[in-house]
Amino acid sequence: MAEAEILLAAPRGFCAGVDRAIEIVERAIAKFGRPIYVRHEIVHNTYVVNDLKEKGAIFIEDLADVPPGATLVFSAHGVPKSVEREAEARGFNVFDATCPLVSKVHVEVAKLRKEGYEFIMIGHKGHPEVEGTMGQLDGGIHLVEEVADVQRIHPEQTEKLAVVTQTTLSVDDAAEISAAVKARFPNVREPKQQDICYATQNRQDAVKFLSPQVDLVIVVGSPTSSNSNRLREVARKLGTESYMIDSADELKPEWLEGKARIGLTAGASAPDILVRRVIERLRELGAVSVRTLDGIEETVKFPLPKGLKLGDAGEVNLSHLR
């Protein structure tokens, strides 16, 4: 890589839901002291999770691992109703960091279920957001991961059938599966507003804009991050070589050989400090300039839960992550 240029996608990195979730944990630690228990990784990023561990967060999957009277935070991905009930029964001091856009899906599912609807959920099996959304109901929700799955499901009735999606999917993949659902079930009720979150869509659109202009796309994100994986896929579908890395240490010099323009982006759960470190590493390997492409400026901000708002706890400085 001789005198290559780095092109930065915009927007990239943290979204409002991730910002809010991390701040909830930070403020809970500041107000209630160490340790604070968090069910599942607060967001799917190794650096963020390790940073919060150092500050006093303990990440658990089973509520049996949380001592009586402890403060518990639900991750940004949301939790099934069974987990909410168990936390209440055990008397924990609970703060819910579920992304408000995920909560919107939960509310819609509960509302339509009361009206007699069954659901088709488009998402990835085993992902905590999918488990959380499907866990809002005791049944009547069918998961499809790909177009072929649409033919395999058998709702009890088709008069009242609605589609919901995981918020971090590929926009194009979700549209393709939704079309297959509509073809099989013409009367299916589609979401009034697309469930895929604004940040996921914006970052995918930015990669679509970036990819044709570069020889290689590097996505900063952890392997468990659904939206980061989708960014890599978007670039590859457009014919641009693309890799996802958790940190600058994973960058392989051979990827850069013969590349004049390197595209760089980050998933919605990846902090900006990791992007800056990748830029430093690319400079060490021969990059000479950095340019940010035009893109949508995001101004969304989600409120904190009661008990953790400004004035409720000590000031929290998240600038090292941004």
Image (spheres, rainbow, N blue to C red):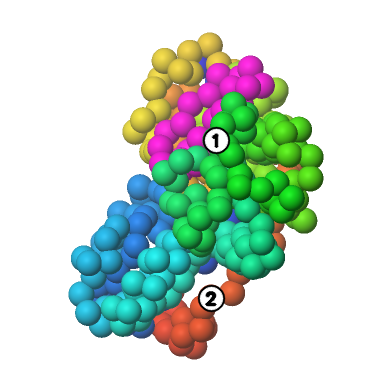
Picture residue at 44% right of the left edge, 46% below the top? 127
The answer to if 243 sits in the magenta stretch is yes
- Looking at the picture, which amino acid does disc 2 mark? Leu
The disc labelled 1 sits on which kind of residue?
Glu
Q: For this rendering, which residue is in front, 35 or 164?
A: 164
Identify the mark at residue 21; answer none if there is no mark. none
> In this figure, which residue is indicated by the disc labeled 2?
304
Label ID, residue 145: 1
Image quadrant in which you'd find residue 150: top right
Callout 1 secondary element: loop
Outermost residue, front side: 156
Side of 88 where 257 appears, left or right: right
For marks 2 and 1, give the CA distance. Answer: 32 Å
Give the image location of residue 249, x and y in percent. Answer: 34, 33
Q: Which residue is drawn at 42% across and 44% down?
A: 126
Residue 201 falls in image quadrant: top right
Closer to the N terminus: mark 2 or mark 1? 1
Image position of 285 (left or right of 303): left
Q: Is residue 237 magenta?
A: yes
- Segment tinted magenta in the rendering: 220-245
Answer whether residue 203 is visible to the viewer in this image: yes
Please determine whether, in this image, residue 51 is positioned above or below residue 86. Answer: above
Question: As drawn, is 212 to the left or to the right of 69?
Answer: right
* Disc 2 crowd, CA 10 A, few/some/many (<14, 14-19, 20+): some
Residue 195 is situated, as x and y percent measured from the top left of the image, at 67, 52
